[in-house]
Image (cartoon, helix red, strand yellow):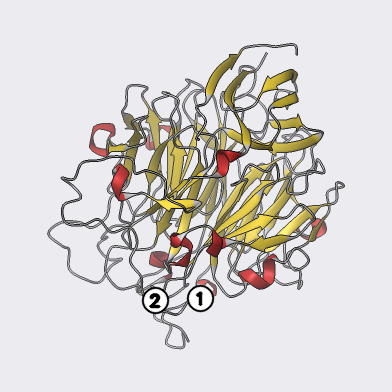
Amino acid sequence: MRRKPNYVLVLLIPLFISGCRTGSKPDSQAGQAEIHVPAPDNDFFQEISKEIGLIFKHSIGEEELNNIIESDGGGAAFLDYNSDGYIDIYACSGTWIEGFIKSERPAELPGSNKLFRNRGDGTFEDVTKKAGVGGPWYSMGVSSGDFNNDGYPDLYINNYGPNVLLKNNGNGTFTDITKKANVGGGKECSIGAAWLDYDNDSYLDLYVGNFLEFDPEYKYYYAPDGFPGPMAYDAQKDVLYHNNGDGTFEDVTEKMGITDIDGRAMGVGAADYDDDGWVDIYVANDHTLNYLWHNEGGKKFTDHGTMSGTAFSQAGEATVSMSVDYADYNNDGHIDLFVSDDTYCSLYESMGNGLFIDKGIASNISMAAAQFVGWSSSFIDYDNDSDVDIFKTNGALKHLYGQEDQLFQNEGNGKFRDVSLELGEYFHRELVGRGACIGDYDNDGDLDIFIMNLNDYSVFLRNNKGNINNWLIIKLTGTASNRDGIGSRVKVTSGGTTQTAVKRSTTGYLSQNDPRLHFGLLHNESVEKIEVRWPSGKLQAIENVKANQILEITEP
């Protein structure tokens, strides 16, 4: 029986190459079909996209894959845009652009970004037009954050061309304030972005990862596989924007020491990896060394990638890195990193002193991952057993060839096991995966997955069995800190096991997970203690909390 969550408000308590496959394609009557939530089947994860009204098709702007920019999109985000307690979905798509795509302009432009409202009954409604968030843009990814602390999440859209900042008006609509805010950039191709409060002034700042100087007219006749790769183009510098607190931002990239030499950013993530109270930035770069920008007390950043051991793979080489996510996978109190790439991937285990060791091979992940090209990756406790697992989307680089996605189960002894094929019919399918976001869309205590497929229909996987075990979901609201609580460190102790999580914005490739923090509790029916360290430095402790509820915690 699926548990019904309880809601508690806490204000202050001193206590492969197999050919192209098709995604979730609707039948010809899907638009008129009655929307209903299907009954759970025997699969752990059940694809229910069409049935619940979540029909989205990503577009590269044309039918054939012809360049590296088309190959890289698209992402999606879980966010509660209307603050009704249910997470909604924003999905990104490319479109036809003159000069970029050689074919003639079609009568109807392909692709559009979409916003789907969660009705709260297990189904979704397309509210794109009403909300004013469709474009047209050639969008890669999206990051959500409440930059003005008004209680409503805003959207930053990474594009080929100028980026877009959409301010949430709080009435179901958004306003494009890019020009006023000064965060649009120019001709960059922005792939990753992350909201963070790097100086702990209670306002979210913005790091934008830029890719390369793409020239659609450039011909490289020696490209061995389809079209020129990233090293055929010059790199673009990343940008750090400081939030001035008045609706505008300042480019402080050089001022803060962000000296981007040769990076080609794909994934960006921000978290306090060394537990010094200041949020740091990790940049997963394509074919070049990754960056770990260490925050020096909010005054500058220094690249610790090489000295920390996170700039390169276990072989000592730069990789085709795609995404990064943070979690304490072994429950030792230190934040670890997982970086997906086109081969072995890297599981960087923190040694607790600012140094990491790549456990990709030792954990049994690398050999299972190597047969696929990995894109989005996220830590996920899919079975609520109190240790985080890893989900990864896969798909070919230069062709619309499908590959199976993977889920690695944490066995609790430093090892992971690929259990994908045990979890349902979906994991036997070959799709061209790119972005993905993870969250509890129906508030039943287990984590569901929304997957973006290149030039194809997206897939929504409902978790049918994770809430057999107990759980806790925590929603943070900052007061002295930024309202989202981004940068907070949360410890949950239950049954003698302490789990540590950090609140961040962007997770996975081009995407963002559920803004709430999720903890699996196994068989424990209560939590002995919750500890929150807010970005402001305030410490908060809550004791004796019942399991199986959504707990709202407000900074004292």
Q: Nearer the viewer, residue 11 or 462?
A: 462
Looking at the image, which residue is at 78% across and 60% down? 306
Which amino acid, mark 2? Tyr
Residue 96's mark? Answer: none
Looking at the image, which residue is at 65% across and 25% down? 201
- Under circle 2, the secondary element is loop
Q: Position of residue 9 (x, y in %)?
A: 57, 15
- Under circle 1, the secondary element is helix
Q: Nearer the viewer, residue 71 or 88?
A: 88
Q: Are marks 2 and 1 in contact (CB under 8 Å)?
A: yes
Mark earlier in primary sequence (2, 1)? 2
- The single residue placed furthest to the left in the displayed view is 107
> Does residue 131 appear left or right of residue 272 in this picture?
left
Total number of numbered labels?
A: 2
Q: Position of residue 25 (x, y in %)?
A: 28, 59
Mark 2 neighbour class, 10 Å CA radius: few under 14, some 14 to 19, many 20 or more: few
Residue 182 seen in render: no
Q: Position of residue 173 (x, y in %)?
A: 31, 28
Q: Position of residue 494 (x, y in %)?
A: 75, 31
| Vertical arrangement, residue 448 with respect to residue 304, above or below | above
CA gap, disc 2 to disc 1? 9 Å
Looking at the image, which residue is at 31% across and 43% down? 52
Residue 21 seen in render: yes
| Vertical arrangement, residue 293 with respect to residue 252, above or below | below
Which amino acid, mark 1? Ala
> Does residue 184 appear left or right of residue 60 in this picture?
right
Mark 1 neighbour class, 10 Å CA radius: few under 14, some 14 to 19, many 20 or more: some
Q: Which residue is mark 2?
A: 218
Q: Which residue is mark 1?
A: 232
| Vertical arrangement, residue 215 with respect to residue 275, above or below | below
Quarter assignment of residue 156: top left
| Vertical arrangement, residue 351 with respect to residue 429, above or below | above
